[in-house]
Image (cartoon, rainbow, N blue to C red):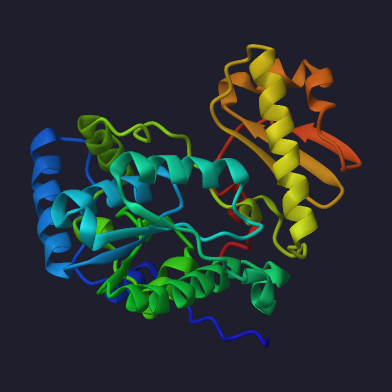
Amino acid sequence: MSSEPVPELSAGRVLELSSGRVPEPVGVDGRVLAGRLDDLAVRLAELGSVLVAFSGGADSAFLLAAAVRALGVDRVVAATAISPSLPGTEQRAAGDFAAELGVRHLTPATNEMGRDGYRANGPDRCYFCKAELTETLRPLAESLGLAHVVTGTNADDAVAGFRPGIGAAAARGARTPLLDAGLTKAQVREASRWWGLSTWDKPAAACLASRVAYGITVSPARLARVERAEAALRAAVHTAGLGVRNLRVRDLGTVAMVEVDATRVRALAARPELLAVIEGFDRVEVDPRGFRSGSMNELLPRS
């Protein structure tokens, strides 16, 4: 399959592609949050019925719960895309959460690897991933008689720098109720806590491809290596009682760069026997700066 051109998407263009205005993100003020939750409920009710692109993360889990509240369980379906980029633990957790809500949970396969731009792993990789996702879910929604595909994009995502995947999904008709209601990540977590959702404090869990340095070809074998490395290291640090919350193994080719919470960097670096559980790389290092979501973007040229 040939690569498709990726339009340049500024934050303003992302907002233009969304279906509603986006207030400036604010702190978690109870009155502001309550108002935005009311706005979200209205927006979801207006959609009529939805297929939720459900990764199992805090945002999509909250959106799924909000959709059930606004529309009822019979007009909501969750869809978790299955591909080599989704860790098995995340798939199982997504299934458990949907079952708790009583929501029908589908697991369609997506073929990101069939897209040249995805495999090439340039800075626009997420564009091809979200294009594949949306083009898989739209016909699925139509076959189920559901009016819209919705994603868990929040208001912070729209102003968080280079996010080509947001535009790819929006250009293909996906709706973004959290973004349109102006809900920030902090507000999503606080509202999830209010509602008693188990995902309210779930650490960020981006797809496995986000661990691979730009320019290094993405393949099922490379993603599986990263998944094994993270699972082994997480088990090791847990057994050692290090109390790590955020953990990533970044694939830099021959080097595995480990990111953990900044407060745990020194403790992990002092335990080479824990790092030794990571296999398949020539060398394993601990990033002294600690975990940063989206740290691969730091390697991109600054305009």
Q: Give the side of residue 290 with respect to residue 71, left or right.
A: right
User: Above or below — where is 95 with respect to 11?
Assistant: above
Q: Position of residue 11 (x, y in %)?
A: 37, 67
Q: Position of residue 287 (x, y in %)?
A: 70, 34
Q: Give the side of residue 228 with respect to residue 188, left or right.
A: right
Instruction: State the residue at coordinates (12%, 62%).
Output: 45
Query: Is residue 266 something one can see in this rendering?
Result: no
Which part of the image, by quadrant, shows the C terminus? bottom right
Q: Position of residue 226 (x, y in %)?
A: 73, 45
Q: Nearer the viewer, residue 111 or 5?
A: 111
Query: Is residue 120 something one can see in this rendering?
Result: yes
Q: Give the side of residue 256 with respect to residue 150, left or right.
A: right
User: Above or below — where is 182 with respect to 170?
Assistant: above
Q: Nearer the viewer, residue 295 or 236?
A: 236
Would you identify the image quadrant in which residue 250 lies? top right
Instruction: State the residue at coordinates (27%, 65%).
Output: 50
Q: Position of residue 65 (x, y in %)?
A: 26, 46
Which part of the image, by quadrant, shows the N terminus? bottom right
Instruction: State the residue at coordinates (60%, 68%).
Output: 125
User: Above or below — where is 21 with respect to 87?
Assistant: below
Q: Give the side of residue 255 with respect to residue 93, left or right.
A: right
Instruction: State the residue at coordinates (57%, 86%).
Output: 5
Residue reaching furthest to the top: 241
Q: How many marks?
A: 0
Q: Nearer the viewer, residue 82 or 155?
A: 82
